[in-house]
Image (cartoon, rainbow, N blue to C red):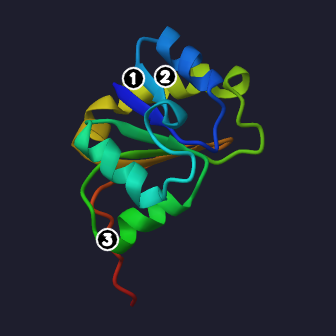
Amino acid sequence: MKLVVDMNLSPAWVDALSAAGHEVVHWSTVGRADATDATILRWALGHDHVVFTHDLDFGAILAATNADSPSVVQIRTQDITPKAWAATLSAVLAKEGERLAEGALLSLDEHGPRLRVLPIRREARK
């Protein structure tokens, strides 16, 4: 799987996820530090990468635009270090790789992974 790590996460994630067999770049090596989230999403789409982030705005953009790609993986914990989460994330990426390749929003926290297939549809209120 090819991932682009957002600026809000440490470049140390590149080594941790590369060691697990993923093709990983940190946004700082391919784009401007002041790039908008929309710019990062467009880059990921054009380069067939999944966005890995701690920023909830990416999911909001996917929902607001009814986008079916690129996939986004959000880590939603206080401790966002590779030491704490790289093994768990690698296992989740291996398990959910096919759905991420098709377009999904995956959130990972202490309670486990939650995956929503894209596009995100608003549920009708009853």
| Coordinates of residue 108 in the picture (x, y in percent) | 57, 42
- Kindly identify the amino acid type of the residue bearing the numbered disc 3: Thr
38 to 107, vertically: above or below: below
Rendered residue at 49%/22% (across/down):
91
Residue marked by disc 3 = 65
User: Tag 3, which secondary structure?
Assistant: helix
Q: Name the quadrant of the N terminus.
A: top left
Mark 3 or mark 1, whichever is nearer to me:
3
Question: Residue drawn 24% across and 43% down?
Answer: 46
Badge 2: residue crowd in 10 Å (few <14, some 14–19, many ≥20): few
Contact flag, marks 2 and 3 (Cβ < 8 Å): no
Q: Quadrant of residue 30?
A: top left
Residue nearest the viewer, comparing 123 with 24: 24
Q: Are marks 3 and 1 in contact (CB under 8 Å)?
A: no
- Mark 1 in CB contact with mark 2 (< 8 angstroms): yes
Q: Is 6 placed above or below 126 here?
A: above
Q: Which residue is mark 2?
A: 91
